[in-house]
Image (cartoon, rainbow, N blue to C red):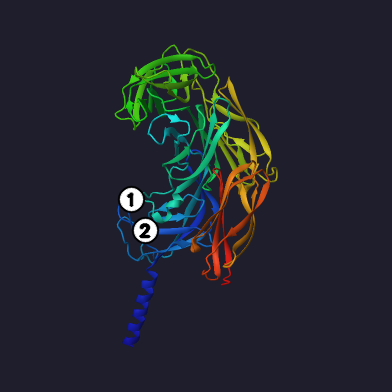
Amino acid sequence: MKKLFALFLILTLLTSLVSAERFVNYNLKEGRIDINNNFVTTNTDVANANAIGFTCLDSNCETLGERIFNNQVVNSGSSSSMQLTYPTTLLSQYGYAVYYFKDGFIPWESNPNWWGTNPSDPAGPFSVYLSKQESCSSQIEQIDIRNTERINTPVVIDVKARLNAQTDSAVSSGTGPLKAIPDEIKNQYTVKTLVNLDIYSKFDSSLVYTTQQELNILFGENGNVEFNFIPRSFGDFRAVVTTKVTDDKCISNSIISKQKDFFVLSEDQQNMCYTQLGDLKLNNTNLKTNDNLIINFDKLSNLQIDKEVIQAIPTSLKLELKDANTNEIVFEQSFVDPENTNTVDLKRVELSITIPSYIRTGLYDLVLTGTGSDVRCDNDNKHDQLIANSLSIVNNDGFNFAPKIISEPTKTAKLNEFYFYDVNAIDPNGDRLTYSLLSSPVGMNIDQNTGLITWNVDSTYFVEGQNVNVIVIVSDGFFFDLQFYSIKIANSNQNGIISKHNIKFSGVDLEANNADGINGFIQIKNTGNFKENGLTLTADIYDLDVHEVLTNNLNLGKEDSFWIPVNIELQKYVPSGEYLLNLKISNNKFSEEITIVLPLTNNK
């Protein structure tokens, strides 16, 4: 009898040890980060999500320790819920760092301290929110143009130049309290952003160069993109950098553009002075007369004595306030800033002015011009110019002025998804503003106090490719401003963007054996909306060390296609089997790759 009781006690203890594991249940939902960066929950289920966990080695989990959940990434599969099994003892006094993630969503973070001694297991369910941001844009902080062969010398014809653009991440942070980002999921904390560069001749406004790159920018950080180009003519040019967020973490996006003018010399010149300004920031853009305005910016002025000798020189600076409507200069002030400590590093400069009491209420542009200051500068001394955002200046003189809409509308929308545009306006008198729609499509609404436009693009009323017109009005109760724009409706699988470049592999007819190599044809089709020139087609079989350029100067018109012959020699001793053939078609605007399984027969 005692033996039976002892056996029963052992079984009971074993059962209690098993149940001591901490099972916690989670429901996976979709969250939203609205246009004002506020987090909003929804009841939309999310399936096929993942979770990964670590011990925290300090507060806020700035440093991560060993993996938990049996060192596995837990996947919910087709379910919108998951169960996590935490260790039976608490492995860290700081608890655990648990990350929930899925491609196309902003990760959710938690800092639990579950452990397996609670008899009420399983616990929960608790809600986890994998989020999307309603509206995204990647701001361009600065543009620098430099000679790559001799740092900070003027750009010269037929010599490679470099343009750097610094862009901000469209997503500021993840949704959670954790500081560390595990290397295993670092890509989940990035935002895909397309950066495009167009260079125009200011002589005839012709486009002389265009290219683009895609960045993956970490949340809350900056991305730097570098373009190289070789000017083929001299004169004045304008570089236009445009950013477009292409990440599925964003529901809609705004295209951001910034430009910089530069001059290309016909040849290296002696006693050439040149100035570079950048990253202009103001402490305030809504001012009253007699307020103090602080201007910060980067600057560099150099004198090129000859091809090899460069010297830093002082900079003459002129600051102007111009009426935004008439372009009349209403205020100007000059400064001289000493030379930089070297000829390479930009120097941060701060200027301060007092808004004069005679300036009337209205909108103004701040223009800053810099010129190298040295008696050795010749007549070709070059300057640089920066224009700040519009300033609103109020003079309590009793006059009332109309408000002004300063935001750029989102001009694409997706079928069966929500469209967002936050209208932003300023009023010179600081009056309370009211927003409304004079003309709009079915279902579009605007918040009269904030200017936020929301619209459910219902396929019952709209079709792909349709254009709809919108007229926004903002009023201070007496005066008003209007904004008219059109929205292009795209299918939901187009991410709200009508692609300009779309080159596809539309046909592959290949045979491979050791005797004759690889022979056949590949068809390339351009379904984009403009011509594609200078296409290069490459073929790679990495297992066989095969790297071939099949063509390097293919031009395709719109809705055009071309069959390219293939003739690649192979080594005789290669065994029969299946090999991966990688094909890539690209030019300086677009690239497309496919990988196909190529059966190889050994006829040796």
In percent of the image, x 67 and y 49: which residue is there? 561
Total marks in image: 2
Front residue of this view, candidates 113 and 162? 162
Relative to 367, is 560 on the left or the right?
A: right
Image quarter of residue 456 = top right
- Disc 2 residue type? Phe
In percent of the image, x 47 and y 39: which residue is there? 227
Q: Residues within 10 Å of mark 1 (few under 14, many from 20)?
A: few
Task: Tell me the residue that label 2 is attached to.
Answer: 54
Image quarter of residue 210 = top right
- Disc 1 residue type? Glu
Cβ atoms under marks 1 and 2 closer than 8 Å:
no
Front residue of this view, candidates 244 and 46? 244
What separation in Å lies between label 1 and label 2 (alpha carbons)? 11 Å
Task: Return the x and y of residue 266 as percentages of the image width and height.
Answer: 47, 27
First in sequence: mark 1 vs mark 2: 2
Q: Give the answer, above or below, for where 297 lies relative to 85.
A: above
The quarter of the image holding the N terminus is bottom left
SS for dot 2? strand
Q: Which mark is residue 261?
A: none
Task: Return the x and y of residue 74 as percentages of the image width and height.
Answer: 45, 62
Task: Tell me the residue that label 1 is attached to.
Answer: 62
Relative to 140, is 412 on the left or the right?
A: right
